Image: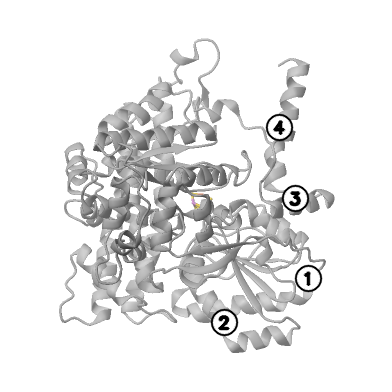
Amino acid sequence: MSDSAEKKSKKKKEERPKSIDQAALEMLEIAAEEGIGTVFSRVDEMKACPIGAAGSCCQLCAMGPCRLVGKGAEEKTGICGATHGTIGSRFIVRAVAAGVAAHSDHGRDIARTLLALSKGEVQGYEIKDPEKLNRVAEMLGVETEGREIMEIAGDVARKALDNFNGVVEDGLSYVARAPEKRQELWRKLGLVPRGVDREVVESMHRTHVGVDQDVEHLLDQALRTSLSDGWGGAMLATDLSDVLFGTPKPLVSEANLGVLKEDEVNILVHGHEPTLSEMIVAAAQKPEMIEYAKSKGAKGINLAGICCTANEVLMRHGISPAGNFLHQELAIITGSVDAMIVDVQCVLQALSPLAQKYHTKLITTSPKAKIPGAVHVEFDEQRAMEIAEEIVRMGVDNYENRGEVRIPSQKGDLVAGFSHEYINYMLGGRYRASFRPLNDNIINGRIQGAVAIVGCNNPRVTQDAGIVYLTRELIKRDVLVVQTGCAAHASGKHGLLMPEMMEEAGDGLREVCEAVGMPPVLHLGSCVDNSRILTVLSQVVEEGGLGEDISDLPVAAICPEYYCEKALAIGTYAAASGVYVVFGVRNPVEDCKEVVEMMSNGWEEKVGGQLLFEPDYEKVLEMVTGRIQEKRVALGIHEEKERVLMDMAARREL
Ligand code: NFS
């Protein structure tokens, strides 16, 4: 690169805003003044390796690492003979397997908690949604008639564990929740997962050097493994969490660092699993604990969340999310976080040295995850409440050690808590809960289609920018948006989850939102709750009038700011379920042309879905709206209907 070109590109990099969130920008200024590094500054110091970034590096064995670069790179192979295609597919299979393992291990632990509860071996848990337990039992083939609730719970948990262990004939139980046609397709293609663990193990085996070397065959394994997450591990995690902790219903809350309180003990739950955070919620609300906080000079205890744990406790208790993935360090820099309790996933190792610079107590709790420098208080369901109280007390005790506190004022109002059950009820009413009104409004064109905007933040792109831009543009075009994970956090911070957003929606979507009383952007929960979206899609197909399979629906999914393997697992199971999926940031296998071709056109032909990568958000918008229109044409519902404003009768009909 010439000097001037280099200067230009440097300038360009400097010009890119780190975030569109004012709270983040304020905290970053403070961090810079104090010479504190964050993920935002480290990303500038660490140039991504361009060889690895595009999928041209294989480091699976000690003959390498091999780099397929330079003149004639496309024709080059690794020392073993592995082509770009093999290297890229192995990367995808392994990333999917890791993502599936993460979600599914989370699901397995919830199943184990349910089993322990059924045997009376845990403290503080109960079955909060017995009706859902019965519905799940039915799905899993567990007898409910005339049986005690704990007997049913025990069998449901065992059957769930069988799904993980692969002790299921004919594949995973929840495959039966998919539309008939989809199930047939999966069976025909041999894509029905045979057990979560089995698929993850086989993925690791097949990608070991010297085993599977065929792009299509390898990527079929990525599809099947991912399905064991979407229609297995994650779906069980969601359903069993609802059984244990309650099925979400809409509630109001606030999001962003502004939810932290200057005069209360701030305790942040961060990570993913709701088992401990549920207990922390209960412990922090105990009158004796609040009294204890008062005895230390605080006005009370303020619980808030980061990342997907935040979504779990938001959805069920209205606990405020303090921020998404890129906010975890910024929260500590406010100087107001007395304890940050983490379990698994998306927890930056940098938190530990950072917490030591401030007064924050960083507490690890999972038997699976320790961080040097953090205090480890291991979680154990048998003493769940005792441990939760111990942890809350640690936060309270730390209140008096605070130094300077600088909490940004920004926070957004939000509505969250849209489970698929609630959406059904909201649309159809208590006595005739159904997706009919949604289908009808898609057919008549008031709603053009639906798009899921999900997933992470990534410091390589401006925080929240893609999520917020695409959400706004889509609702303007009469596209209903559903969200989960850090994307939902972003929308919450920026006020996009409020019913008032219908003002920004297109006329058609706005009419429907007004009639039903729902926001045009629905928060469906944490990342494992993407499984709720699969359930909604299946029910919409079942309702009729929009084709026979998920791949017939005018829908798409976007993960604009992805960073982790879990996101790739989710994107892959969505594609395997027939959804058109676009990721932002960059294509991790860009140099592997065969792989890119297979995941786009190949998968379109095979499973009716695709997994694409496009960093330009305007192009992403074009791509997904184009897809929606294509599907409307295929369904024969594309003709512009004469716009008739809804009268009272039509509203009543809704
Ligand atoms: Ni999911 Fe990404 Fe992490 Fe949750 Fe946030 S980063 S893939 S959204 S917290 S898992």
Amino acid, disc 3: Leu
Q: In the rendered structure, which disc, 4 or 2, sits on the residue that comes first in sequence?
A: 4
Query: Of 519 and 155, which appears nearest the observer?
Result: 519
Mark 1 falls on what kind of element?
A: loop
Residue 642 got which mark?
Answer: none
Question: How far is the residue under mark 2 from the one under mark 3?
Answer: 32 Å
User: Residue shown at 17%/48% (left/top)?
Assistant: 180
Residue 28 got which mark?
Answer: 3
Q: In the rendered structure, which disc, 3 or 1, sits on the residue that comes first in sequence?
A: 3
User: Residue shown at 44%/13% (left/top)?
Assistant: 75
Mark 4 falls on what kind of element?
A: helix
Amino acid, disc 4: Lys
Provide residue 393's location: percent of width, then percent of height: 64, 79
Q: From this viewpoint, is residue 235 visible? A: yes
Q: Residues within 10 Å of mark 2 (few under 14, many from 20)?
A: some
Residue 52, relative to residue 427: is it above or below? above
Mark 3 touches mark 4? (CB < 8 Å):
no
Q: In the rendered structure, which disc, 2 or 3, sits on the residue that comes first in sequence?
A: 3
Q: Which residue is mark 2?
A: 285
Residue 650, relative to residue 64: is it above or below? below
Which quarter of the figure has residue 399? Answer: bottom right
Q: Residues within 10 Å of mark 3 (few under 14, many from 20)?
A: many
Mark 3 touches mark 1? (CB < 8 Å):
no
Mark 2 falls on what kind of element?
A: helix
**Residue depth check, mark 1 versus mark 2: number of the one nearer the observer:** 2
Q: Which residue is mark 1?
A: 402
Horizontal arrangement in the rendering, residue 335 relative to residue 278 (left or right): right
Mark 2 touches mark 3? (CB < 8 Å):
no
User: Is ligand 1 within 8 Å of the beta carbon of the residue shown at mark 2?
Assistant: no
Q: Which residue is mark 4?
A: 13
Q: In the rendered structure, which disc, 1 or 4, sits on the residue that comes first in sequence?
A: 4
